[in-house]
Amino acid sequence: KRFREPKHERRPWRIWFLDTSKQAIGMLFIHFANVYLSDLTEEDPCSLYLINFLLDATLGMLLIYAGIRAVSSIVEWQQWESLRFGEYG
């Protein structure tokens, strides 16, 4: 994915790694939560994974979006320059 970004807009390796590692950690969490939940129930593990994925991709994204908007508003209101999202200095 990094090499698909225009060369003049490419993130440094460290920032790219930090951004993508957040996604990998989230996927690992969902995977292990699914494995744990499938042992507790008699349901098909694949259907539980689909439910987890759909909830994460819809409700989870809405919650994250609302949280980022709320925190961004507070950061702008308080003028905390070092806490702006996407600003890495």
Image (spheres, rainbow, N blue to C red):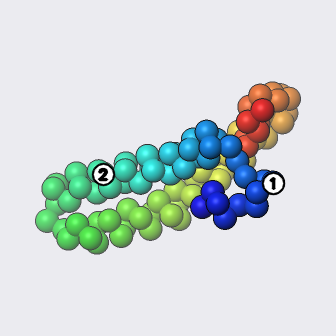
Residue at image coords 51%, 64%: 57
Residue at image coords 61%, 39%: 14
Q: Is residue 81 above or below residue 85?
A: above
Q: Amino acid at mark 2?
A: Ala
Cα separation between marks 2 and 1: 39 Å
Question: Residue 2's x, y, as percent?
Answer: 63, 57
The answer to whether residue 70 shows anywhere in this view is: no
Q: Is residue 23 above or below residue 73?
A: below
Question: Residue 54's x, y, as percent?
Answer: 44, 68
Question: Residue 66's x, y, as percent?
Answer: 66, 51
- Residue 20's tag is none
Q: Quadrant of residue 61?
A: bottom right
Q: Quadrant of residue 43?
A: bottom left
Residue at image coords 77%, 28%: 82
Q: Amino acid at mark 1?
A: His
Q: Is 9 left, or right, of 14 in this rendering? A: right
Q: Quadrant of residue 41?
A: bottom left
The quadrant in which the N terminus is found is: bottom right
Q: Is 72 left, or right, of 24 in this rendering? A: right
Q: Which residue is the site of mark 1?
A: 8
Question: Residue 59's x, y, as percent?
Answer: 52, 60
Q: Is residue 54 above or below residue 63?
A: below
- Residue 33's tag is 2
